[in-house]
Image (cartoon, rainbow, N blue to C red):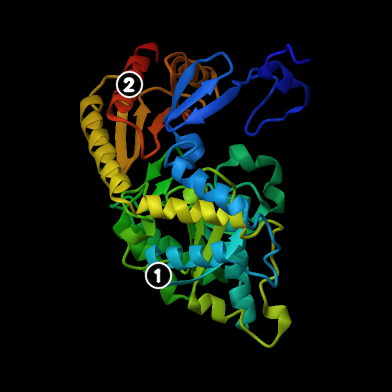
Amino acid sequence: MTNMSLKERDKKHLWHPLTQHKLHPETIAITKAKECVLTDEDGNEYIDTIASWYTCMYGHCNDYITSRVSTQMQKLDQVVFSGFTHEPAVKLSEALIKILPENQSKIFFSDNGSTSVEIGIKMALQYHFNTGEKRNTLIAFEDGFHGDTFGAMSVSGLSIYNGPFEDFFLNVKRIPIPNGKNHHTVLKALQEIVSNNKVAGFVYEPLVQGAAAMKMHNAEGLNKILKFCKKHNIITVADEVMTGFGKTGKHFASLYMETKPDIICLSKALTGGLLPMALTTCSQKIYDAFYSDDISKGLFHGHTYSANPLACTAALASIELLQSQDIQNNIKVITASHQVFGNHIKNHPKVKSTRQLGIIFALDLDVKMERYGNLRDKLFKFFMDNGVFLRPLGNTIYIQAPYVITKKQLEKVYQVIEDALEIV
């Protein structure tokens, strides 16, 4: 057994996410990672251009984060968070509240992006229940994606992930994203939904829909939607699992809108990719609806590893890095580099369109492609063969690299993407 490669041993017992193993029997075995580079068991190196699903934004095995967690491991590793607290959680809450939108007041811990959204949905539904109303409908954008638990799937609009489960979903009504020209149409659709349903909440990805291939929408239009929701006491739940912690050019995408969400869902880059953790934050208004002498009005949701001290320590170190001058300068450099590349590549005959917000860059190929199909697989192989880890989403190639990527590495990524257009 020990003479077999990792990828051969992998086949015996492991079932990978988002994978049809009959069509894709091979996996790539990664043995180490540092900064922006992944190294496989054969010694091949790949620039991690998507920060391993948008998590390792300060680079893999970041020395500052790992050293802080190593110290914490010797002091307190884990303790139940029901009835107990600890310094890493308290310090994290104090640091986070300082950078969140100003209306956020309370923080609830869980362990991944899906559960952070699940909790946000439960907060929105129970808020109305606790205040004497029964509202049973949620609003979400078309083509949104919020995770794989049932509430999160319910508000997601990508049927490729959700098809077998749709008969079991919550009641959700969908609206188109605001594109800068359809404000009136979107608001009219909202008014119709509210007139015919008891709407509890609006769950949305602010400004960028990640799984929808980095589909971007208009901040002014989203602000109009949020204002409408506030007027009708519809609880707004911003899923910033992907957009949070600097990727859009601000600490949070919600900061681009004047009207702030009632609830924010966070994970991924929260801990710099080192450990799994998630947060659902909310305004004092939301918290107050659960604060009662009636025990049944409490939020009875909990995870064994809620507020794990090691994960809290990693998150606190990550926030300190995010606020550092070096990282903020790097974000500006990456943003400017993407702009230059976008202007260069947008007129290529194989490119249909480009778009960008902060360090998030995407281009659409002028060719029809299946989300998971032969051409997508061909592109993925081309990228990996050339030392760049990119995961096309349908006909969209996108970049969301760690903040520590070098200019030389970025130039290689751009060149490999341009070279790939020749095989489309």
Q: Give the quarter of the figure containing the C terminus.
A: top left
Check the image and report above or below for 326 versus 307. Answer: above
At horizontal 61% and vertical 79% (from top left) the residue drawn is: 290
Picture coordinates of residue 419 (x, y %)? 33, 15
Q: Is mark 2 in CB contact (under 8 Å) with mark 1?
A: no
Measured in 3D between alpha carbons, the distance from the residue under mark 2 to the one under mark 1, in whole angstroms, is 45 Å
- Kind of residue at badge 2: Lys
In front of the other: 402 or 114: 402
Residue that mark 2 sits on: 412
- The secondary element bearing badge 2 is classed as helix
Label 1 Cα crowd, 10 Å radius (few <14 / some 14-19 / many 20+): some
Check the image and report above or below for 263 versus 169. Answer: below
The earlier-in-sequence mark between 2 and 1 is 1
Labelled disc at residue 228 = 1
Q: Give the quarter of the figure containing the N terminus.
A: top right
Check the image and report above or below for 63 versus 343. Answer: below
Labelled disc at residue 285 = none
In the rendered image, the residue lying farthest to the bottom is 293
Q: Is residue 247 left or right of residue 55?
A: left
